[in-house]
Amino acid sequence: MKLNYSSILFILTVFFISCTSNTEEKTKTKLKSYQSLEVPVAKKVEKKLTAHADTRLDNYFWMRLSDDQKNAKTPDTQTQDVLDYLNAENDYKDAAMKHTDSLQKTLFDEIVGRIKKDDSSVPYTDNGYSYYTRFEKGMDYALYCRKKLEDNAEEEIMLNGPKMAKGLAYFALAGRSISQDNKMLAYGIDTVSRRRYTVYFKNLSTNEILSDKLVNTTGGVTWANDNKTVFYTSKDSITLRANKIYKHVLGTDQSEDELVFNEKDDTFSTFVYKSKSDKYIFIGSDQTLSTEYRYLDANMPNGAWKIIQPREKNLEYSVAHFEDHFYIRTNLDAKNFKLVKTPITATTKENWADVIPHRNDILLQNFTVFKNNLALGERVDGLSTLRVMKWNGEQDHYIEFNDPAYFTYPTTNLDFDTNILRYGYTSLTTPISTIDYNMDTKEQTILKEQEVIDPDFNKNNYVSERLYATARDGVKVPISLVYKKGTKKSANTPLLLYSYGSYGSSTEPYFTSTRLSLLDRGFVYAMAHIRGGQEMGRHWYEDGKLLKKKNTFTDFIDVGDFLVKEGYTSSDHMYAMGGSAGGLLMGAILNMKPELWNGVVAAVPFVDVISTMMDETIPLTTFEFDEWGNPKNKEYYDYMKSYSPYDNVEVKAYPNILITTGYWDSQVQYWEPAKWIAKLRELKTDDNLLIMDCDMETGHGGASGRFERYKRSALNYAFMLDLEGIKQ
């Protein structure tokens, strides 16, 4: 049939409408499930915050905990409006991720399934006993055990973790220490997740729990050699700063304890410990740029404390004892630190003599003293190393390691008179191993390698690489990455980039069986060793803090750009992850270059920088001025404001974001991520997923149980895998 123009136009119109209708229908079917959900909306209450003639408008300031609410653990510690909002965000997260429930269960079962259920630690010896922890099948918490160093010795269960934790939503045990006569055990318990421990004492001969109880402590005690006197650290009840050292005598009430040291400078915190030789007790007091130590004869708990070297700005040191000297790691005229010794009778810095001089290219991280040997933990070319030397100078060598990127460290070495150095070793492809090294013969014995309960696991099926990205200022930034053999590197390859980048804490290339759930599904996992850490030496840290903090953020972005340019992934398939100060990193890179990432996981993120650092009642604030700066100084205020994630949220598109936090977090208060997500919801212009998981029972470290914590790992992984279209 011959069609005229009108007929053709009619048919084309119908066809176009039909196609449009079909396209719209297809588009609707492609809508993510969360896009039909009602998004939580936080109320806005205008709050003007003025400093240095500058005013910030904070519409969500009302979420912060008031001073008189900060320490109780009851449902009404916060206003109902805040609790309602946190619960609404949790409900929205649950609904938005509902379609991944099966995937999350699969991931959780995988992760937990790789963990040996009846595992135990490698025993270490101390004062006639062998000490170890072990897990029984089905138990979330450990049994803490010991045996006498004699044939057929029976096991003593000192503490039964599963029994002690029964019925508690959170349980953490810390600071276990034994009296010199091996009869008394001290230990700390936290059931809130605010890291405020109550110390208890147990008679190991009778299994009796003493009536002595020390509240509001850091968790441990240090025993004097009389077996009845202990020294412990207490915390400020509001700021949680460790600020006082007390002396307690068993059988007396805590109210009778003697205050032996009060750290009045609120930029310092304090601690107490015993020398490896058991001859001295040390009180340390430190901040980011300064330390001070005093000591006491452990046989004379009522004696007078003596200062080793009075505190000075920019002078850091730490102390150990050997024979007639104190051995001191210090930055005195040594940016990368050096090892010195000083007579016990003359301890101030003018008496310090070099043992290991300063080196511009090697960072001295730690040292362990033995009768005939000295073991040094050093960092060379961005990687940790172990160096062993004889006191008599006959031998000086490094332990050799073959992985392109790895992490090694001394572990429990309590015995002086031994030629065995015990150390840990791991790499991105090698499970954590505990190794005994004969410092005389160089023979090594692997005591234990972390067992991965998976018949298909073989560490040789994974590949690690060490790369270097050039930052925008020309600095070479190391990258450690790992992937499964056969994974094709292309623009379609999913990649997770992780880092921390603060406090001089290095991001170490270690193995975790948890990560296999990503690698086995085709992900590349990369670590960016950015400035703010200490991988490349002390200057690496100093170039990533205070008024140079932005180097941390731009290094991470430049590493991401490098990985895209080199064909490892693309912005459509690249993810970023970091926690705490690494969460600050996530917040900053989201504002600075949101288009580089398909998804970002920000765990317990420090994002409200100015308001937190302005409030000296918040835990950690006062003794972190040397890390971030004090915003009461205009120069630091202006610089912080230029990168603070919360203050720099803008009207623009952001990638998919998962935020995690804990209601009882003592380090990054829950209201920082809560305010941040509220502001992101208000201003972002995209339809990407934005969710927050607020655990109402835990704090900064997440769940306390051995397996429970992996539910959040499963959520994190499901978030990324779902965005990649990987359903199982």
Image: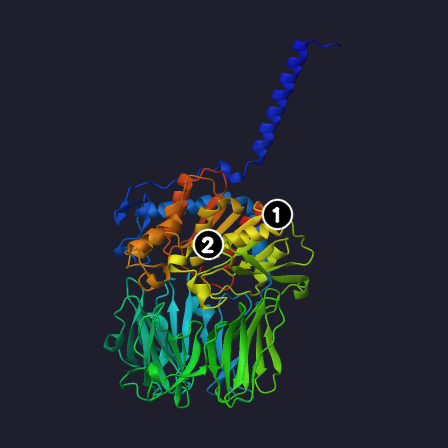
Residue shown at 51% from the left, 90% from the top? 392
Q: Secondary structure at mark 1?
A: loop
Taking the view exactly as shown, the residue that stands out farthest to the right is 1
**Pointer 1 residue:** 726
Residue shown at 65% from the left, 49% from the top? 490
Nearer-the-camera pick, 174 or 459:
459
- Answer yes or no: is residue 712 visible: yes
Q: Position of residue 340 (x, y in %)?
A: 42, 82
- Answer yes or no: is residue 121 visible: no
In the image, residue 376 sits, relative to residue 616, either above or below, namely below
The quadrant of the picture occupied by the N terminus is: top right
Q: Position of residue 591 (x, y in %)?
A: 44, 46
- Give the mark nearer the N terminus: 1 vs 2: 2
In the image, residue 330 sits, relative to residue 673, either above or below, namely below
Pointer 1 local density, CA inside 10 Å: few below 14, some 14–19, many at least 20? few
Nearer-the-camera pick, 29 or 472:
472
